[in-house]
Amino acid sequence: MDDRIGLLGFGAYVPERCMNNQEWTQYVDTTDEWITTRTGIKRRRIAADDETTVDLAAAAAEVALADAGMAVQDVDEIIVATDTPEVYTPDTAAFLQDRLGARRVPAFDLGGSGCAGFLLGLDLARARVQQRDRRILVVGVELISRLMNWHDRNICVLFGDGAGAVVVGRAADAVEIVAATAGTDGSKADILWLEAGGSRVPFSREVAASGAHRKLVMKGREVFREAVHHMAAASRQVLEDAGLGIEDVALVVPHQANLRIIQAVGGALGIAAERVFINVHEYGNTGSASVPLALWEARQMGRIAPGDLVLLTAFGAGFHWSAVLLQF
Ligand code: ACO
């Protein structure tokens, strides 16, 4: 069999502490019923006080390397997708290179691309492997619980912490990346954003006092509409690019933001509910970690068989969106 460019190993990590919906009533005026009916989320993981973003990323990366049967010395490049980095500068990828004990290989973050970051990283890794044979570690990680406002009920109940990782390379038995597509609409940046902390509203004592550094602004209904539209459109596009139809897809693994968004994407694509993977009830929205975590879990649960065509799609702040087609 000819070598294929694709995934050589999969990994994930979630923190031990599990927080259910009821626990949120200690912090905000909410109910398990509201969270369940509006989002489908029942619980999420919360990082321990002594865990940071690189801890989550390294744990997922080590599982992916072991799954690929690789030593860390075999890694030729590292890409980390995150909106909740270790520090502001340098990027999390630098910390991860050091933590893993990898060679002094190129390492960089895809920051700020919201929940679409991991799939953008996958597409980028594929192109770089095509250009020059190499093995690239791609990680999606989010430690959002420490950076969000625990007293803003519009936001805090939606998210959870976690990490997912894959190794991209060339091998006869790789899970092939058949096609990928992505897009951006920056005119909608202010529908889902955190404005303070950059050049526009520099961090200051006043910003800290007002809590603006933790104020993620989200127009929920618009985000919902845009997410459904773009995840469905990107999915159709990637299938068209590959000359395939939705009937060829064994499993859709969408970004896990909200059960209703996932169901609406499945409906728009005309795929049976049992062929759409869902774990948002367990982990909430884990941002860039959501797709690799769901993919890892789908594989662990035996939901993917050899030969299956699996469609990944994500949408996040930016707005950015992406879809990637895998052949197992
Ligand atoms: N508990 C109780 N009430 C709440 C809570 C809560 N945790 N959060 C908001 N509310 C209230 C609001 O204050 C508002 O009250 P008001 O009408 O008195 O002002 C009301 O609930 C809003 O209700 P709806 O408009 O009916 O809520 P909706 O059905 O739109 O659901 C939600 C809100 C869940 C945010 C939805 O719009 C959504 O999921 N949007 C997508 C957002 C998302 O997924 N963001 C994640 C980042 S982007 C991404 O990953 C795709």
Image (spheres, rainbow, N blue to C red):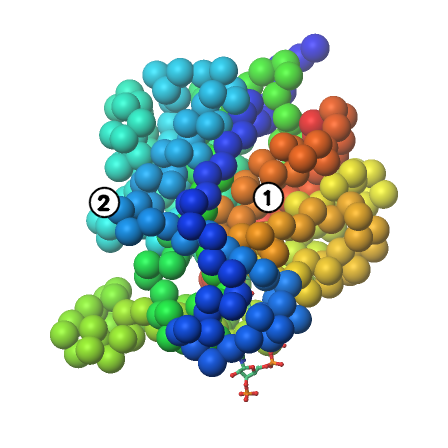
Residue visible at 42% across and 45% down in the picture: 15
Q: Is residue 128 visible?
A: no
User: Are discs 1 and 2 less than 8 Å apart at CB?
Assistant: no
Q: Is residue 10 visible?
A: yes
> Which quarter of the picture shows residue 74?
top left
Residue visible at 57% across and 27% down in the picture: 7
Q: Could you say where residue 68 lies in the image, as x and y percent from the top left?
A: 52, 20
Instruction: Specify which label sits upstream in the sequence, 1 or 2.
Output: 2
Judge left or right: residue 300 versus residue 214.
Answer: right
Give the amino acid at mark 1.
Ala
Residue sitting farthest toward the top:
1
Q: CA distance from mark 1 to mark 2?
A: 28 Å
Residue visible at 28% across and 70% down in the picture: 213
Vertical arrangement, residue 65 with respect to residue 194, above or below: above
> Which quarter of the picture shows residue 76?
top left
Vertical arrangement, residue 262 with respect to residue 218, above or below: above
Q: Nearer the viewer, residue 34 or 23?
A: 23
Which quadrant of the figure contains the C terminus?
top right
Dot in front, 1 or 2: 1
Image quarter for ligand 1: bottom right
Which quadrant of the figure contains the N terminus?
top right
Residue visible at 68% across and 65% down in the picture: 260
Mark 2: C-beta under 8 Å from nearest atom of ligand 1: no
Mark 1 lies on residue: 294
Judge left or right: residue 315 versus residue 326.
Answer: left
Q: Could you say where residue 72 lies in the image, as x and y percent from the top left?
A: 37, 20
Mark 2 lies on residue: 90
Label 1: which secondary element: helix
Label 1: few (<14), some (14–19) or many (≥20) C-alpha neighbours in 10 Å: many
Give the amino acid at mark 2.
Pro
Q: Nearer the viewer, residue 3 or 206?
A: 206
Mark 1: C-beta under 8 Å from nearest atom of ligand 1: no
